[in-house]
Image (cartoon, coloured by chain):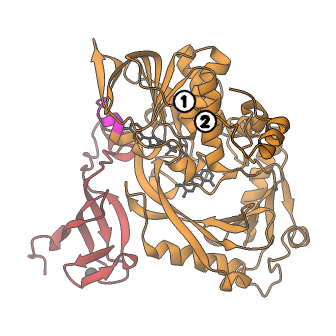
Chain colours: A orange, B red
Amino acid sequence: MTDYSILSLAKNALNGQVGWAPAWRKPDPKPAYDVVIVGGGGHGLATAHYLAKHHGITNVAVLEKNLIGSGNVGRNTTLVRSNYMLDRTLPFYEHSLKLWEGLSHDLNYNVMFSSRGIINLAHSPGQLDVFRRRANSMLLNGVKAEILGTDQIAEKVPALDVSNAARFPILGGLYQARGGTARHDAVAWGFARSADRRGVDIIEQCEVTGFLKKDGRVVGVSTSRGEIRAKKTAIVVAGSSSHVLQQAGLNNLPIESHVLQAFVSEGLKPVLDVAITFGAGHLYVSQSDKGGLVFGGDLDGYNSYAQRGNLPIAEDVATMLLAMFPAFAKVRMLRSWGGVMDMSMDGQPIIDTGPVPGLYINCGWCYEGFKATPASGYTFAWTIANDAPHELNAPFTLSRFQTGYVLDEKGRGPFPGHH
Amino acid sequence: MIIDCPCCGRRPVSEFSYIGDAEAAKPDMHAPAAEWVKAVYTRTNPRGMHLEHWQHLHGCRQFLKIQRDTLTHEIFSVELVGVYASGEGE
Ligand SMILES: Cc1cc2nc3c(=O)[nH]c(=O)nc-3n(C[C@H](O)[C@H](O)[C@H](O)COP(=O)(O)OP(=O)(O)OC[C@H]3O[C@@H](n4cnc5c(N)ncnc54)[C@H](O)[C@@H]3O)c2cc1C
Ligand SMILES: [Zn+2]
């Protein structure tokens, strides 16, 4: 398969677009692989890409029960940032952001990463102090952060009312200029194509229904398309983590599955060229390249495996969007959907070996999973190849809930729905 | 989602507040740390039938034990908890 380039674009533009080949093959599963990755979301596909590219491990299958990109990787609101606070989480997200910055070239696939900047608005002095503290922590870790005054915010977001007459007056904001958005399904397709070109089998409509065990070790999986043996089995199924891992005997994970909704408005002319979060409630919004406002807020608030939510959240996020931008009152909503989130007990993920030999787990992503996709794949591939964590994911153990080294950025406690 | 409160009748979910998983009982105060780790930090998180606590916050304010399917959102039972569970606490 040839590289995508300006030449291939031009050639196909002239010959009626008939020269494109499928971006990945549709192979049947082989009886055995060195590594089987369960879950063809962003993280599973990224793991396959980095396993092949950095570790030379190409006898790999990614098993996806549906079509790749149909899970959360294709359902999120695409915010990418690294404005974290803890010394044990920030370097991981910063590494991810650096990978994002070179991702389209690395994959030879345009993931439309746009560093348009992210502003977190503060509406109280206490909140502004918390943002200052976070900005200082970022600076200490070598990551640029700025605290903006209302004049600077008005300049970047003219549609925002920064006067005292606003419903929730704005006092300032935390700004990360390198943060931004990306095209989510292109991320899935780009990683898939890159892994496939290096020999990885991407097998869609293949649901894992159980685990093959021998002498207490996981040696493969049973699937809707037969048994597949593997030297190493990596589980990265986001919202389905508890459900799938139960079949490997892990009945008590520090995870609850919750539904999170996303909303998109009709297309508008450019009105918002940064991503922005509201501090007097929970709302984040950006404008897509097609012109739609893309926004979301809280979880629906109860355990759910349904990829759809209830109406109260639609009202809730719309109320907050209008508190922030009253001018959007006449904008019509176009689409909404839900995704099942793997909410961990401290808001941070688990990327670890075990706890059963032969098994590798990657889950608990909460709201952090899209921005983390490249670093998650990078460190998970490392962990699988070396049977030990990379220093960036060393804090993301399953055992941290026993040892007390939880990674609770905001000090919200062991309530999965609160992160 | 509509919840049929034993006190107030059928009400929209927005009147209720979710407390969480009601499957696991809290261990004894002096139980070993491992049992507390399990109770505080881990969940069975089933896809399907789930026992959970809710509160009718914007209604009678009673705590409720609800049996609900986490995949379909269908509700199978709603009961009062604590001294009112048996109907004897009135
Ligand atoms: C509405 C919404 C908004 C979000 N916004 C953001 C955001 O702005 N920024 C951010 O960083 N993150 C965001 N997230 C979180 C982020 O999308 C997820 O954390 C991340 O996509 C999860 O990893 P994934 O891509 O691998 O998951 P998925 O794409 O869900 O991949 C998991 C895959 O596993 C498959 N699977 C499940 N069970 C099996 C089985 N038995 N056999 C085979 N395959 C199986 C599923 O079909 C699925 O395709 C958001 C999430 C949602 C739902
Ligand atoms: Zn009631």
Name the amino acid, label 2.
Pro
Disc 2 designates what residue? Answer: A22
Chain on which label 2 sits: A
Residue closest to the eye, B51 or A402: B51
Residue pictured at 68% horizontal, 50% vertical: A183
Q: Would you say residue B35 sits in the magenta stretch?
A: no
Residue closest to the eye, A170 or A373: A373
Question: Mark 2: few, some, or many residues within 10 Å (few <14, many ≥20)?
Answer: few
Q: In which of the image's four quarters is ligand 2 placed?
A: bottom left
Classify residue A65 by image quadrant: top left
Q: Is residue A177 left or right of residue A385?
A: right
Disc 1 designates what residue? Answer: A25
Residue pictured at 65% horizontal, 29% vertical: A194
Q: Is residue B63 above or below residue A166?
A: above
- Kindly indicate whether the residues beneath marks 1 and 2 are on one polypeptide chain: yes
Chain on which label 1 sits: A
Q: Is residue A283 above or below residue A202?
A: below
Residue pictured at 81% horizontal, 70% vertical: A270
Name the amino acid, label 1.
Arg
Residue A212 is situated, as x and y percent measured from the top left of the image, at: 29, 21
Residue A17 is situated, as x and y percent measured from the top left of the image, at: 72, 44
Residue pictured at 64% horizontal, 34% vertical: A21
Marks 1/2 in contact by CB < 8 Å: the verdict is yes
Classify residue A253 by image quadrant: top left
Q: Does the residue tagged 2 have its C-beta within 8 Å of any atom of ligand 1?
A: no
Magenta residues span: A244-249
Q: Is residue B76 above or below residue A419?
A: below
* Residue B4 visible in the current orientation: yes
Residue A60 is situated, as x and y percent measured from the top left of the image, at: 51, 20
Secondary structure type for disc 2: loop
The quadrant of the picture occupied by the N terminus of chain A is: top right
Q: CA distance from mark 1 to mark 2?
A: 7 Å
